[in-house]
Amino acid sequence: MSEQKNYKIERYTKYGLIILVIILVILAVFFVIQFRSLYRQRIVHSWESRISQILQRRAPLPTSDIGVIRSWMTFNYINRLFSLPADYLKSKLNITDLHYPQLTIYGYAKNLNLDQAAFLKQVENAISGYNPTKTSTSTK
């Protein structure tokens, strides 16, 4: 009787391990598919995290450095990066989304079915047109 129990335990253990391996393979395939999708959408790039670390040490940037803006950046991050007023881009780009400024450029463009590259250019143009003296005098 004991041998029969051991045989059943071994058999169930083998089946359990096989099922576990299948689940892990499926999860690995799912992860690779999702990562490739994010990579194609230019959301995940290995060098962008390094750029982010460099930019955080250099902030605030002058408006002449608009070339560092990427679609994965949130409006909040861009505001801090260039020392822009919190609602500057919101008003300049007529953004009405309630998630502003915790919204990425890519996410906003995707939600409105806008061309991502064209919208990124609009953001860059808005930042390069920022004049802190004009903004501070208009609020007085």
Image: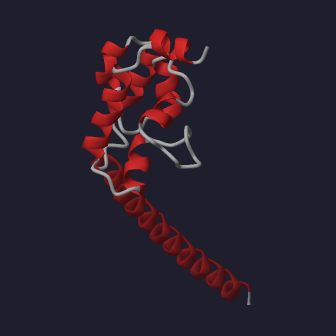
Residue 11 image point, x, y percent: 57, 81
User: In front here: 55 or 116?
Assistant: 116
How far across and down, in percent of the image, does residue 105 sit? Answer: 41, 41
Residue 75 in the image, given as x and y percentages of width and height: 49, 34
Residue 84 x %, y %: 50, 20
Between residue 91 and residue 35, name the one nearer to us: 91
Q: Residue at x 55, y 31 (%)?
A: 87
- Can the viewer see residue 28? yes
- Residue at point 45% right, 18% down? 82
Snapshot quadrant of residue 31: bottom left
If the image is split into quadrants, where does the N terminus sit?
Answer: bottom right
- Marks counted in the figure total 0
Residue drawn 54% across and 11% down? 137
Front one among 75 and 32: 75
22 sits to left or right of 66: right
Quadrant the C terminus occupies: top right
- Above or below residue 10? Residue 131 is above
Q: Residue at x 53, y 49 (%)?
A: 97
Asked whether the viewer can see residue 74, the reply is no
Q: How is the image coloured?
A: secondary structure
Q: Which one is nearer the viewer's eye here, 50 or 71?
A: 71
